Image (cartoon, helix red, strand yellow):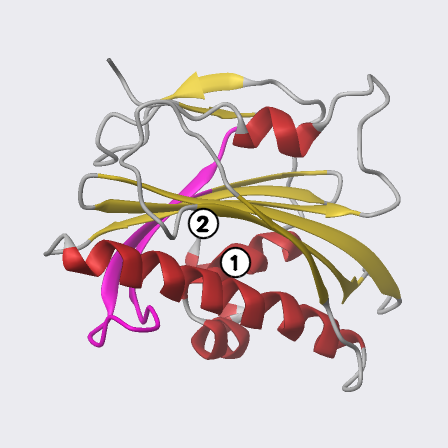
Amino acid sequence: MTDTDTSLRGPLLRQLGVTGLLMGALWLTACAPALDWREMRPPEADGLVARFPCKPDTASRMVPVPGLGDPQRVQMLVCQHEGTSWSLAYLRVADVRQVGVAMEGLQQALRENVQAAAVLVAPDRRATESTSTAIEVPRMTPQPAARGLAFVTERPDGLGRPMPMRVNAWHFAHGLTVFQATVWQPAERPALESGEDVATTFLRGFQFPE
């Protein structure tokens, strides 16, 4: 993610924090011509294996996370294709007691971010949270706050018109590292022409080594 990319979205990102940085990917203009799923191991991620459908941009920033007080170093990977954005954000906390707090904080920030996207369309727009489900990432550290969230919201398209969006996110942990994986996709295009469920493929592609 370049300084030019972020300068155009500075006020929004400062307001929304870590998930604002992820939502900012929805406004990136560059995208891959076709999905090309590739396996990768993000740096400093406790060996996490992830699958991205396009080459992700990377960033590392000090940003506020609700509940953790001081800004935290959050690492991010984001890629986009035809209006769909796949994001992974993660941070390492200092104490095991902070793991659940960090997960809840990321979930709170995501809810605020999803609502903020709707407000960009019109002040009275409201996003809806449709589900909150248990998740299972192979060999993740069990945490009560680990869950999957799903939302329906809107954001402006390139012409400023309302575009319905589906948002799916998983929050999980491994040791002291906390992860948020998110997919934003146009509601009218839940799958590609191949029938591939791009959110499910991404979210179920995470695992930790034996």
Going 73% across and 72% down the picture, which residue do you hit? Answer: 118
Residue 103 coordinates in the image, percent (x, y): 36, 56
Q: Amino acid at mark 2?
A: Met
Q: Which residue is mark 2?
A: 1
Query: Observer-nearest residue: 162 or 137?
Result: 137
10 Å crowding of disc 1: few (<14), some (14-19), many (20+) = some
Tell me the CA gap for discs 2 and 1: 6 Å
Which residue, as the protein is rendered here, is positioned at the far left? 94
Q: Which residue is mark 1?
A: 5
* Relative vertical location of residue 138 with respect to residue 135 in this rendering, above or below: above
Q: Secondary structure at mark 2?
A: loop
Q: Quadrant of residue 111?
A: bottom right
* Relative vertical location of residue 93 with respect to residue 159 in this rendering, above or below: above
Label 2–label 1 contact, CB within 8 A: yes
Q: Which contiguous range is marked in magenta?
A: 55-77
Going 40% across and 46% down the picture, which residue do you hit? Answer: 146
Which residue, as the protein is rendered here, is positioned at the far top? 210
Going 57% across and 58% down the picture, which residue do you hit? Answer: 23
Which residue, as the protein is rendered here, is positioned at the far bottom? 123
Residue 161 coordinates in the image, percent (x, y): 89, 67
Residue 129 falls left or right of residue 206: right
Residue 23 falls left or right of residue 35: left
Residue 147 coordinates in the image, percent (x, y): 48, 46
